[in-house]
Image (cartoon, rainbow, N blue to C red):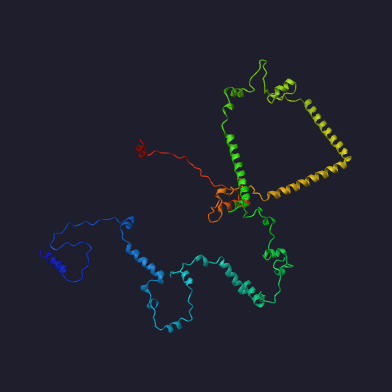
Amino acid sequence: MCGPEPRTVSRAVMAAAPGPQFLALKPVAAPGSPPGPRRQRRRLNKNKKKSWNKHSDIAAVEEFLEDVRLQERVSGGIVSEKTDENLFFVDTGDETKDLLHNKGKVKPLRIDLILQSDSKVPVPKDILAYQIPNSRKVRKKAEREERLGIVPRKQRLLYARLRNPVAKKKVVPNNNPARDFYDLWSTASPLDKELEGKDVWFLEQTKKMRMKRPHKLNQKPSQVAAIEVIAPGGSYNPTFESHQALLLEAHQVEFKRQRAEEKIRRQVAFPPSEELPTKESVLGELCQGLLVDSDGEEQEGRPKADSEEAEGGPVWNVMCRVKKTERERKKEKMIKKEKHRLKEQKAARQKQQDLFRLRSIKGEVNQLALTLEKRKVKRKEKQKAEANKPRRLGRLKYEDPDLEVKLSDELAGTLRVLKPEGSILTDRFKSLQKRNLIEARIRAKFKRKHKLKYVEKRAFREVTL
């Protein structure tokens, strides 16, 4: 019974003893108070990796490993394992002595220091980079050459270059005041003297002479100027005549557009009541060619076979075709040969007649040559006239932009109060199309893939009701 008493005394003495005290991990009950209910330790199943990761605290281990990696990156190893000479240096305090000590060292540039790696961990070696393909074969070849006294090809070439060094040609400076002058725009250049007498193919392969460009590459797709000058009526302060001429041109363009729209509207319009089809006209069109007279013959539109039969001609009926006899086949063959013979006789007589009209044939040939020459000239003129017109490069046709014109009441006398017309970006875009540099384009239209589905919400229905 004396056992618990000294234990209680020792705890009280420890609680009352002066000195530094540590914070308890768990709240300690006051002395003399009754002990509380003991909390049962949570039992965990740690026989699986899932439970290890879930219930194990590895923060301290990860912090330690991260600290080790940081030391390896910054200092090239663990700081505690390094010597004092690697970690510290002695500052003598004498700047002159330090400068003399570092006189032979070259300080790297700042940009080189930035580009250098800040990690002291060496780069892992690429094992495949040190492997030599066919190393055994190369080693045996080197041993054989050494045994027979054969000098390798690389060394032979090196010895040849050392024995016969290439004399470098001294470049003549172009700042000599006594040098010869030449015309910069002339066709003959002194720089081409080195290329004279050499093979053309050699000069092309060594890129010392330009290759001949195709003629098409030097042609422009259109002769229209990149920036066209507008009409004098489009200036900010035009004369009355020039402005009226520009207004007339804009009026004609708008009138043509309205006529085209009116034509389309008239074509798609619903016909008037007088031209609408009636039941009688529809029935007459449906019965066209189907009505029969009292004699048993059709009124109109009877087949061609019936008309030929009435005239006594042959009737070609595909369904009732009769096989020809041998006599009929021989007769047709004879008729065919006779036609061919007559045709050849006619051609022979025509050739004989042409011999007597050589003069007239010569005149016809000359007339044909003149006609072809006129057509050629006309074709050339047409091509020259259409050279400046925009061609159709795509599926769309080029359309001229709207004229940028101001009405008479919108004219301004100064540039300060003038409001701009049109857009510079649109003008450049249309200029590229007009000069055949790009094809005519339009803005892509939005096309909905699925139909819109309208749903009436319950809240909206309650408000509307």
Q: Report x, y in % for residue 114.
A: 46, 70
Q: Does residue 422 appear in the picture of this structure?
A: no
Whether residue 384 is situated above or below residue 15 in the rendered picture: above
Q: Residue at x 57, y 24 (%)?
A: 278
* Nearer to me, 162 or 359: 359
Q: Report x, y in % for residue 416.
A: 53, 56
Q: Residue at x 71, y 22 (%)?
A: 307
Outermost top residue: 294
Whether residue 142 is situated above or below residue 447 in the rendered picture: below
| Quadrant of the rendered image containing residue 459 | top left
Whether residue 281 is situated above or below residue 111 in the rendered picture: above
Whether residue 49 is situated above or below residue 202 in the rendered picture: above
In this rendering, the count of numbered labels is 0
* Nearer to me, 335 or 208: 208
Q: Report x, y in % for residue 181.
A: 71, 72
Q: Report x, y in % for residue 284.
A: 61, 22
Horizontal side of 216 relative to 422 (left or right) equals right
Quarter of the image that includes the C terminus: top left
Outermost right residue: 356
Q: Does residue 86 appear in the picture of this structure?
A: yes
Q: Residue at x 37, y 68 (%)?
A: 68
Horizontal side of 162 relative to 446 (left or right) equals right
Quarter of the image that includes the N terminus: bottom left
Q: Residue at x 59, y 71 (%)?
A: 142
